[in-house]
Every structure is written in structure tokens, then in C-alpha cells.
Image (spheres, rainbow, N blue to C red):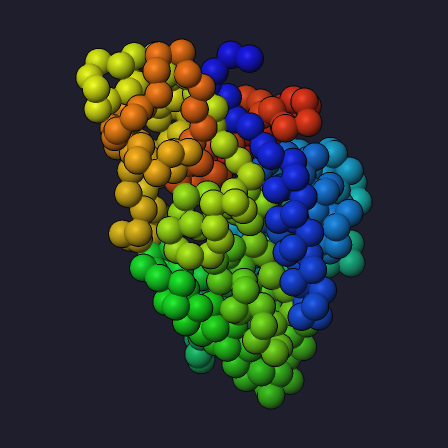
Amino acid sequence: METPYVLIDMGILHNNINAMAAFAASNGIKLRPHIKAHKLPEIAWMQIKAGARGITVAKLSEAEVMFAAGIKDILVAYPLIGESKLERAAELLRRGCKLSLLVDSQLGAQQISDLAAPGGTGVLVKVDSGLGRCGLAPGPGLEEFVHWLCRLPHLNFRGLLTHAGHAYGCSSAAEVAQVGTKEGELMVEAAESLRRQGVNVAEVSIGSTPTVGWGGRVPGVTEIRPGNYVFNDATQVALGVVGRERCSLRVIATVVSRPAADRAIIDAGAKVLALDQGAHGSGTVTGYGLMENASWRLTRLSEEHGIVEGTNLPAIGDIVQVIPNHACPVINLAEKVRTSNGQEWKVAARGRVW
């Protein structure tokens, strides 16, 4: 097979899917995995068959791909702003998609209300639990917004949602545990405050692969939305979330040059592995992926070249494996992936970012 290519170990993939489903079931919470990590209907269906109660997507275009693949219960965990996007959401609703949307602004909520979808559109309000991205901070402002939203026609307020992505800036598993626990407690407290004011908060939804093992144990959390867990990657290993043996995605590459005794060049560069070294400030990730030999370090990437340094390096023509720093952009860069049982899957939602 021509290199470089993306390979999925199906045994590890199934174990990861089943382990998260078992965690959700044992804690009495719903699992709504985020498919932006894999963008593959094949894996989404594996997750649903293992017990997931629907899926999460980042963008409406991903929802369209997954709905076309037969998946109907979909949450778009991203603000939809603009007439064209709302028209596309309305079309999914008309075609029978059980679509839920996210809001954190009056304009966004009003536009969804104006859809006037029969039976109303389910919405969750985004809460900022520390990432400092989208969402409203817990407190009076959030509560006033929810009360206002509940008065809008054609909207069904379903609950609160957050993503503790700042966990990726942690430097240890202990810090991740603190962020995850705080994420769950903060969200449950926000929901309870609204309930004391007479608001029905059906869902308390949290999500990130590093934190769900902690936030998902907090009583009152109803739903988790991890995504990366199906693959895991060098970042999850560096954070202490999993060991290398839980990483199901590899980039397979060939050594094409040995210009020095301590340097080898592979045919997987930034166009395959991406340049991600941690989106939220983590200093735990070094280099550009984990190599199969601990004495090899993938120290630099150019567009088409990966520079490996170390001792006892592989020879020209040898095949090597790389666990990428971040699996999600690797999938989005790949036109297709191969599986350990001989299948080849087109990445159906690749490039679906609108």
C-alpha cells in the first residue's frame, strides 16, 4: 500500500467505543459522542450500536452527512448564525431529523425561533465553564438569558451544555481530574439554580475526552459528549488519560532518506500529521507524534517531510508508525482511511466545516 496513509486498529477502536459506552451506562448518563473526531458514519454507527443515544457534530454540514447515513438524533454543538444555515437546519427538521441546536446569544435564539418549526426546535444553552470561548458564564446573566429564551415561541429549552476544552492546557492527570470535577459541579449547580426558579432543565451536558471520566461521575450530570476517545492520540497520552495501547489511529509512513546517522526522513509531513502541539497551551506535548521506538523523536515537519532524530534509526525503505499529536485534524486531512481488517473507508465528512 502506498504511504503515507491513516490506519485504524479495529480491535482497539472497538475496545475504546465499548469502554466509554460502559462508563456512561454504569453512571446512569447518556452518551452523545462528538463525531468531529472521526467524521465517519461507519464509526458513528458503531457508537450508536454500542449504546450512544445520538451524536454530536461541530457543524451543520457534518449533520447533513450523518443524517444522509441514517442517523437521526443529532446535536449541533456550535452557534448557527445566518439565514442560509438556518434554512438548512429547517430542511433537516422537515426531513425528520431530531435536530437540537446550541445558543448563547439573543440573536441566535431569535433566528431559531423564527424558523417556526412544527413542534418547536430543541435548544441547549452554551455555558462557559472555563475555556473562555463561546458560552455564558454561570450566574445572573445566564439565568436571565434562559428565562428570556423560554418565552420565545417555537423553541424547546432542553438544558445546559459545556465543553471544558481548557483541560487540554493541563500538565498532569491530577489537574485534568480537577478540571473535570469542577466542570460537572459547576454545571449541576447552574442547572439547580434555574430549577429553583421554576425552569425545567432536562439536560446537563458536558464533554471532552480528558474530563468525562471525572465530570461524568458528578451526580446531576445527564449527558457526556466525548469525541477523541475512539482514537486517542499523543495528547491524551501526555495528559495521562490513556496509555499508548489505547491509541487506535496510526499514520503509516516510509523512511525515504537517511542524510545523517542521527536523522531519518519519512514521507509523512504536516499535510498528513498536522502541526498541532496543543490548542490550549499544554506544555506536555513535544514533537509531532509518538514513534514506535522510544529513542526516536519526530522533531520537525515540513509539508511533505517528517524529520526523525535519535539512535538506531530505521533504514531507507522501512515502514514506521506514528501516533499523531491530535487525531482529529489528521482525519480531516485524509481522503480515506484503512482499517486493520482490510477495509477502506472514505472520510465522508472530511472538509465539512460550514
- Furthest toward the front, the residue is 312
Q: Is residue 113 left or right of residue 291?
A: right
Q: Residue at x 63, y 28 (%)?
A: 340
Residue 173 rendering spot, x and y as whole percentages? 40, 63
Is any part of residue 54 visible from this angle? no
Residue 163 rendering spot, x and y as whole percentages? 48, 59
* Up/down of 239 relative to 294, above or below: below
Closer-to-camera residue (49/34): 49
Closer-to-camera residue (130/121): 130
Closer-to-camera residue (310/204): 310
Q: Residue at x 28, y 43 (%)?
A: 286
Q: Is residue 300 left or right of residue 232?
A: left
Q: Quadrant of residue 101?
A: bottom right
Q: How many marks?
A: 0
Q: Residue at x 78, y 58 (%)?
A: 119
Is any part of residue 318 visible from this angle? yes
Residue 177 rendering spot, x and y as whole percentages? 44, 68
Residue 178 rendering spot, x and y as whole percentages? 41, 71
